[in-house]
Amino acid sequence: MATQVNKKVVAGIVVGIVGLCLLVVLAGVYFAQKSPTKNINRGDVAFGAGDYELAATQYSRAVNKEPTNIEYIDKWRDALVRVIPESDADYQEAYELYLGGVLESKSRQRPGMGEFQIAYVNEFIRRAQSAGARNAASMDAIVEQVEGRARGLNEDDPFRTRVLRWRGFALTGKAQVTNLTDEEYATAIGDLSAAYELDTDVRALVDLYELHDAVRRRAEADRQAQRAEEASSQAEDVLARLQDEHASHPLVIATSLFVERTAASEMPREMAIDAMRDAGVEAASAFAAIDVKEYSVDVLLQAAILIARLSPNEANADIDSVLERKLEEFPASSRLMMQRAQLALSANEADRAFDLFQEVIDTPNQPISLDGLRLLGNRRLALYYQGRLRIKESEVAGRAD
């Protein structure tokens, strides 16, 4: 009887041990699946083999499991920016992962790290500009994003000033379309002035001029004489500083031309045409003399587009020479290629324009980046212009017959 009891006890103990072991194994499997290490290892193997899409997928899974791990986020970024999606939809999705998944995750996980905040804000602003954000609601959304990124930074952190510079930019954009409150106006002045004093950011000073000028124009339209006079005086002071200290900067050249055009609008028509022709040629000549390597593609394009819009065709050759030199540095820039093609189109060089648009169309997809995303839109735009050129060519041929 005792032997039978002992056997039952032993059997029960064995079953319990086996069950416990099974639970340990299952728990091990469960936690192994929950652990990001396996995903990281798989991602590293895929990355080493050049399969960046698989690597990005594995790293993103690791980040989902351990979202505070900056090393994992960096691995995800390094793989993602090497991926070259084939379709436009896949490219758009991958870029949004880069912006919202990688850059935003880093800024959110380390709110006190200025480098992470400025990296996200800079990309977010460039994306908003590329998407054509122009209305007051869009500008308010940018302000909200910027203030959120600045909130975790110390008051004396230089990165806080660099982040808030973009609040000044957004409020300047808002001033173009609606009236700013006194508080918004003062905030924008403070943000842009601080950015210029910190980094001698000429673009911030140009934005400050445009802010005052926009406030002046809206105040004049609303017959607010005192506000218009004050804004006009401040705009003149900023413009004088730009022309005194940064006369050779492309944005200052373009801004000065814009001021010339505004002044010419008050002249008799023939006199205005002559004044703008002379001012445009002079501005384009100064623009062509600059060292293009000193300025970013964004800065050069802002200046080139403004000069091309405001100056006569006589200035196109100088602008074209600037774009050609910058293309030597960035041969795959679809934005530079598009501007060059549009200049040829405006000069009625149809065959050359068609070929230059074709260069944009033939440019292969680039790894994930905002410039790569812009290429997709520029391809569609180039095809549209080519279609217009062909229609015009057919119409001319039809009239000749």
Image (spheres, rainbow, N blue to C red):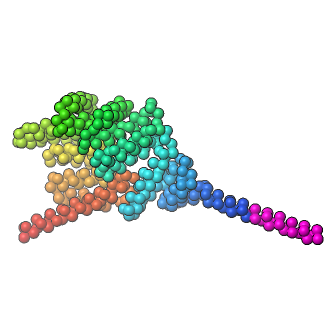
Overall secondary structure of the magenta stretch?
helix
- Comparing 213 with 328, the one in front is 213
The residue depicted at 55 percent of the width and 48 percent of the height is: 69
Q: Does 221 sit left or right of 87 as displayed?
A: left
Q: How many labels does the image show?
A: 0
Q: Position of residue 73 (x, y in %)?
A: 51, 50
The residue depicted at 36 percent of the width and 45 percent of the height is: 142
Q: Where is residue 94 in the image (x, y as percent from the top left)?
A: 43, 57
The residue depicted at 27 percent of the width and 46 percent of the height is: 301
- Can residue 392 be seen here? yes
- Comparing 30 with 46, the one in front is 30
- Comparing 337 with 114, the one in front is 114
Quadrant where the C terminus sits is bottom left
Q: Where is residue 235 in the image (x, y as percent from the top left)?
A: 23, 32
Quadrant where the N terminus sits is bottom right
- Can residue 255 be seen here? no
Magenta span covers which residues?
Answer: 1-21
Q: Does the magenta stretch include residue 14?
A: yes
Q: Does the magenta stretch include residue 176?
A: no
Q: Does 46 sit left or right of 251 as displayed?
A: right
Q: Position of residue 55 (x, y in %)?
A: 52, 58
Q: Does 3 sit left or right of 98 as displayed?
A: right
The quadrant in which residue 274 appears is top left
The quadrant in which residue 304 appears is top left
Which residue reaches farthest front?
1
Q: Is residue 230 above or below residue 372?
A: above
Q: In this view, does 240 lie above or below 174?
A: above
